Image (tube, helix red, strand yellow):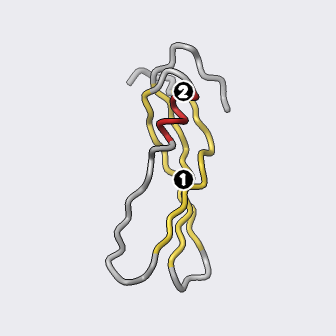
Amino acid sequence: MAYIPKDAEWLLAQHVEEIRVQGRKRNVVHINYVLIEAKTPEDAYRKAKLVRSVMAPATSIRIRQRSEGFKTINSANSPI
């Protein structure tokens, strides 16, 4: 994890998510950027774990989404 200053209020996390579609040989991996308001990296990680994507398939094909965790959590350098 990168250095995070003590006065950081906003952190940017890269959330990695795998998506598999029934009947397909390949999977898709998305890296989603999530902006989190937190005072410490531990607090940011706790809040970031609550992030879940919601996808409602329009057909009867089964879609499985799985959170693979976080690639990075860094401080946002500019005021927001």
Question: What is the CA distance from the residue labelled 1 to the residue labelled 2?
Answer: 17 Å
- Quarter of the image containing the C terminus? top left
Residue positioned most to the left: 58
Is residue 53 depicted above or below 4 in this figure? Answer: below
Q: As drawn, is 65 to the left or to the right of 53?
A: right
Residue 58 in the image: state x and y as whole percent: 32, 77
Label 2, secondary structure: give it: strand
Residue 5 in the image: state x and y as whole percent: 58, 17
Residue 76 in the image: state x and y as whole percent: 50, 27
Earlier residue among tags 1 and 2: 1
Is residue 29 depicted above or below 63 in this figure? Answer: above
- Residue 72: image quadrant is top right
Label 2, residues with CA under 10 Å away: few <14, some 14-19, many ≥20: many
Q: Which residue is under mark 1?
A: 31
Is residue 66 depicted above or below 70 in this figure? Answer: below
Label 1, secondary structure: give it: strand
Q: Hey, what amino acid is under mark 2? A: Ser
Tell me the residue at 36%/74% (across/down). Answer: 57
Q: Hey, what amino acid is under mark 1? A: Ile
Tell me the residue at 52%/67% (across/down). Answer: 19
Residue 17 in the image: state x and y as whole percent: 54, 57
Q: Which mark is residue 75?
A: 2
Most foreground residue, 77 or 11 = 11
- Quarter of the image containing the N terminus? top right
Tell me the residue at 46%/74% (across/down). Answer: 63
Tell me the residue at 49%/50% (across/down). Answer: 32
